[in-house]
Image (spheres, rainbow, N blue to C red):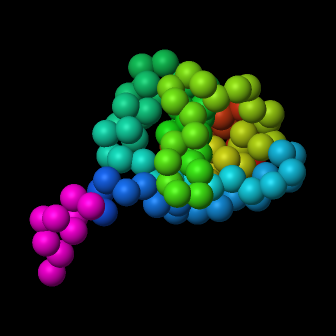
Amino acid sequence: MLTKEEIEKACQNGHPAKTVDVPEWGGEVCLREPTRAEVERAVNLHNSKKLSALGPRLMEICICDDQGGRMFQDGQLPAVGALAGDRLFNACLEVCGLGNDEELLGKGGTTASGTPPT
């Protein structure tokens, strides 16, 4: 069984959870599993505004370096193109345990880039 110290250490250390190929950017991006509080803040933002706020927010909290540290702070992520944005958004949803964009939006919704889900 894990000790309190082991749990605290595991929670403090960010670990890349998934690598996503982003050919539009010429390489791969590491995504980390965010904290529960980070996910709740992003979803609350989504619920209070619109989906276009959720995609960039999830990407900001999930994109990480190879050590699991966040690369972008809130509001720092530059505008992301539709193809790369949809690919990263869906990967972020998976890492966060939120399902896919169709489940989150319901039938007939739009993705993070404003396009209908595929």
Which residue is painted at 74% across and 56% down in the image? 28
User: Where residue 52 sits in the image (x, y, percent)?
Assistant: 61, 26
Magenta span dominant secondary structure: helix
Q: How many marks?
A: 0
Q: Is residue 43 left or right of residue 73?
A: left
Q: Is residue 13 visible?
A: yes
In terms of image quadrants, where is residue 25? top right
User: Where residue 96 sits in the image (x, y, percent)?
Assistant: 46, 52
Task: Pick the quarter of the image with the N terminus.
Answer: bottom left
Residue 13 shown in magenta: no
In terms of image quadrants, where is residue 114? top right
84 vs 49, nearest the viewer: 84
Q: What's the magenta region?
A: 1-9
Q: Is residue 99 visible?
A: no
Residue 5 shown in magenta: yes
User: Where residue 54 sits in the image (x, y, percent)?
Assistant: 53, 31
Which residue is painted at 22% across and 58% down in the image? 8
